[in-house]
Image (spheres, helix red, strand yellow):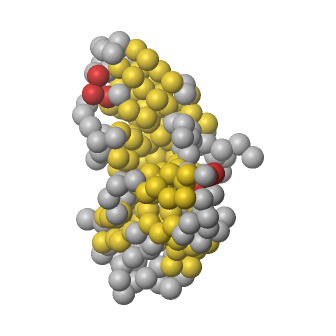
Amino acid sequence: DAGVIQSPRHEVTEMGQEVTLRCKPISGHNSLFWYRQTMMRGLELLIYFNNNVPIDDSGMPEDRFSAKMPNASFSTLKIQPSEPRDSAVYFCASRQGQANSNQPQHFGDGTRLSIL
Amino acid sequence: GDSVTQMEGPVTLSEEAFLTINCTYTATGYPSLFWYVQYPGEGLQLLLKATKADDKGSNKGFEATYRKETTSFHLEKGSVQVSDSAVYFCALSDRGNNRLAFGKGNQVVVIP
């Protein structure tokens, strides 16, 4: 039973470059979440989608960050241009059920992003 | 807003010792409560959950009871193993806003 799949697992790039992180949620899950994890700030919710529609993007740090979900099986998080302070581990999670479900979220293994 | 507070600092203990990690929460509604575990280099995995007051979640020898009167959801295990070394996150989900609010996590190190 495949879990949430993220790619790449690691990304190292230079400041100013565009970065695209990818996520494939668990089949049948209605909601998808993007998180950022750093030592200083812990886990932060960036944005979440329900039925492919962005519901809450208030956690997106600034206009350099954008996220899309073109279909139920794929989402991207893009940073353009990237900055060293964007270095973090980015997690994608998916959840079954409707918007107010109390079902748990299932996490991918994350993308470790380093901006030099 | 909704929030979760976990005890400060890492926890280091010997194999077969008793583990407790404290978690308290603040929520306006009736949240569901979760414990997630993160092993090195991996994503978070659901460890256990409780959806209403007095529910006890349990898994892999870990337990936590939803205490509405003390707004707590402390994690316990009677006899830890080296393989339990990981970071443990307490979280709540309020049906009203769909967000999972996480605590800052506790690093647990079990020494043989």
- Circle count: 0
Say which quarter of the image contains residue B42: top right
Task: Left or right? Give the position of A44 relative to B89.
Answer: left
Instruction: Look at the picture and state if A96 lies above or below B72.
Output: above
Of residues A70 and A103, the one drawn nearer to the viewer in this rendering: A103
Instruction: Look at the picture and state if A88 lies above or below B38.
Output: above
Q: Residue at x 54, y 37 (%)?
A: B41
Q: Residue at x 56, y 46 (%)?
A: B39
Q: Residue at x 40, y 69 (%)?
A: B22
Task: Left or right? Give the position of B75 relative to A45.
Answer: right
Report x, y in % for residue B2: 30, 66
Report x, y in % for residue A25: 59, 42
| Residue B49 visible in image | no
Report x, y in % for residue A79: 35, 25
Report x, y in % for residue A46: 36, 43
Q: Residue furthest right?
A: A1
Say which quarter of the image contains residue B81: bottom right
Task: Left or right? Give the position of A59 relative to A30.
Answer: left
Q: Quadrant of the C terminus of chain A?
A: top left
Task: Left or right? Give the position of B56 relative to B67.
Answer: right
Q: Residue at x 26, y 37 (%)?
A: A61
| Residue B51 visible in image | yes
Instruction: Look at the picture and state if B34 lies above or below A13.
Output: below
